[in-house]
Structure formats: C-alpha cells, structure tokens
C-alpha cells in the first residue's frame, strides 16, 4: 500500500507542497470581488487588516491584483503573498510596494495571524484528508479562510468560505457568456467536494437542480445567459443577491458530503 503524502517541512517549517505555479492576470477576479463584498466590514473593523494570498504561484500577479482590489475596500489593508518555493518569493520581491509583501511559508502562514486567507488552486493536489488537515492548520492562525479552485483563465470557479467552526458556504461562479450549463462548474469543485459529485450526494443533487432550473429558464435565453442564470438561481432557495455576477452561494449544509 502506498503511504499517503505528508506535508513537506523545510528548515523554516514551511508546511505544504509546491503548486504547479500556474497563474494569469485576472484569474482570481471572481473570488476577489466576492471577498471585497462579503468581508468589507470585517476588514474595515480590524485594527490591522492583513490578508494572505497563500500559494500565489510562479508570478505574483494574483497578490498584486488582490492588494489593488482590497485597497478600494480599506486603504489600510496589507496583503502578504506566501509561497513555499523560495525562488518564487525572490522573483516576487520586485513587485513589493507599501502594503504588499512576499514571504516564504506554507500552511503555517509564516507565523502570521492574518484577518483572512485566500487559498485558490492550492489544495487540489492533496488527498482529501490532507486538505482537511490543511484547513485546520490555516484556521488555527486566521479568522477566515476562502479556499477553492478555478480554471486557468478564471471563467469557472468554486470556493468554500470557512471560519474556525468549519465550512460555512459554497459559492459557484462563472463567466456567464461562455457558460453552456451550470453543471459545467463541477470540474472546478474544491477538493472537499469534487470526489463526492456522484448520484446520491448533496453536491450532485444541487448541480442537477441548477441544471433543471436552467432548462426551465430557457425562455430567458434570447436576453442572454446573465438573465437566464438569474432566473434559474431565483428558482432555488438560496442566496441570489450576487446572481447578476454569475454567482450562487449556498449553505455548506446543503452540499456537505
């Protein structure tokens, strides 16, 4: 039997494994704008608001963009990009500016205690149990973790919102003009859900329900996918306030494996 992988821990005790490093401008714009809207009050209410971009990849563009977007929420926000690969940290240093820094670290967050951590496209390479362990490690040092996955150019995304009590919500997000069916988002489910998307599971039922609502909203197709998505989401008993942005947020209990 193959032994499960363990987190790598170097001399600085940086916990985790290097990601593929794939990144692109605006790849994380959907989750960024959701964070800016959902957690504006949390950031403004913090004495020293610090947000971590965990595992930002081979280039620092996602951290730079996160900093710019959250500065519009509160100019005091500091963003720290954390990467386990020291070469990536060194390469990011020229992008530093007031309120934006880059350090080496992993799930232990380089010893920081930030207000919020964003970890996108970080945990898909782990086993499900390891991903859950990583959640616990990160949440021992922060109030909020937003963890999920998106495609290479950010058109399909899904993320889980967690606090120290555990997962609270799942958000599905899409670039609506290019969406064929809501269930296309299944391939971007976070590690905690992707292997559970099978008949009989709650996440599978949600996607099937959303597809059925999409079909029932076919009469809105001439007005574009945005109007069709809004009409489909409004048929479901979930938060539709951000449906116009191509998002649907549901309670974790409705999809929990």
Image (cartoon, rainbow, N blue to C red):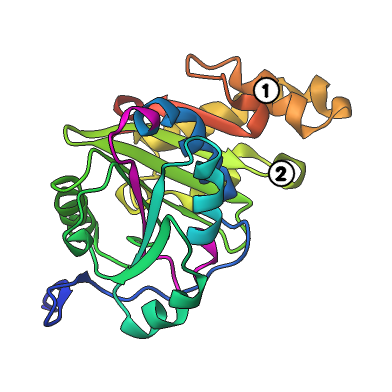
Identify the residue position indicated by label 2 in the image.
Answer: 180
Q: Is residue 58 visible?
A: no
| Spot occupied by residue 194 in the image (x, y as percentages of width and height) | 38, 51
Residue placed most toward the observer, 173 or 25: 25
Residue 227 within the segment the image draws in magenta: no
Q: Quadrant of residue 41?
A: top left
Q: Is residue 236 left or right of residue 5?
A: right
Tell me how far mark 2 sits from mark 1, CA to CA: 15 Å
Quarter of the picture containing the C terminus is: top left
Residue placed most toward the observer, 40 or 14: 40
Q: Which residues are magenta?
A: 44-62
| Spot occupied by residue 254 in the image (x, y as percentages of width and height) | 35, 25
Q: Is residue 233 left or right of residue 220?
A: left
Q: Residue at x 40, y 80 (%)?
A: 88
* Tag 2 secondary structure: loop
Identify the residue position indicated by label 1 in the image.
Answer: 230
Q: Residue at x 26, y 74 (%)?
A: 17
Q: Residue at x 49, y 52 (%)?
A: 67
Q: How many marks?
A: 2
């Amino acid at each position: 039997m193959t032994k499960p992988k363990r987190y790598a821990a170097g001399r600085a005790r940086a916990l985790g494994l290097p990601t593929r490093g794939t990144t692109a401008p605006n790849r994380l714009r959907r989750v960024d704008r959701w964070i800016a809207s959902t957690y504006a009050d949390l950031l403004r209410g913090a004495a020293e608001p610090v947000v971590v971009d965990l595992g930002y990849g081979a280039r620092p563009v996602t951290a730079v963009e996160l900093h710019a977007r959250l500065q519009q929420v509160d100019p005091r926000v500091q963003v720290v990009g954390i990467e386990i690969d020291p070469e990536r940290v060194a390469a990011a240093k020229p992008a530093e500016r007031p309120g934006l820094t880059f350090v080496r670290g992993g799930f232990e967050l380089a010893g920081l205690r930030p207000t919020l951590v964003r970890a996108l496209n970080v945990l898909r390479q782990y086993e499900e149990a390891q991903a859950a362990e990583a959640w616990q490690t990160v949440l021992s040092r922060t109030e909020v973790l937003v963890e999920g996955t998106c495609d290479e150019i950010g058109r399909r995304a899904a993320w889980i919102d967690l606090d120290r009590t555990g997962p609270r919500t799942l958000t599905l997000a899409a670039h609506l003009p290019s969406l064929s069916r809501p269930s296309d988002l299944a391939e971007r489910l976070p590690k905690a859900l992707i292997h559970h998307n099978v008949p009989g599971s709650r996440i599978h039922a949600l996607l099937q329900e959303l597809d059925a609502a999409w079909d029932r909203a076919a009469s809105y197709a001439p007005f574009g996918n945005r109007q069709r998505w809004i009409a489909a989401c409004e048929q479901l008993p979930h938060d539709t306030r951000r449906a116009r942005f191509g998002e649907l947020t549901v309670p974790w209990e409705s999809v929990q494996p």
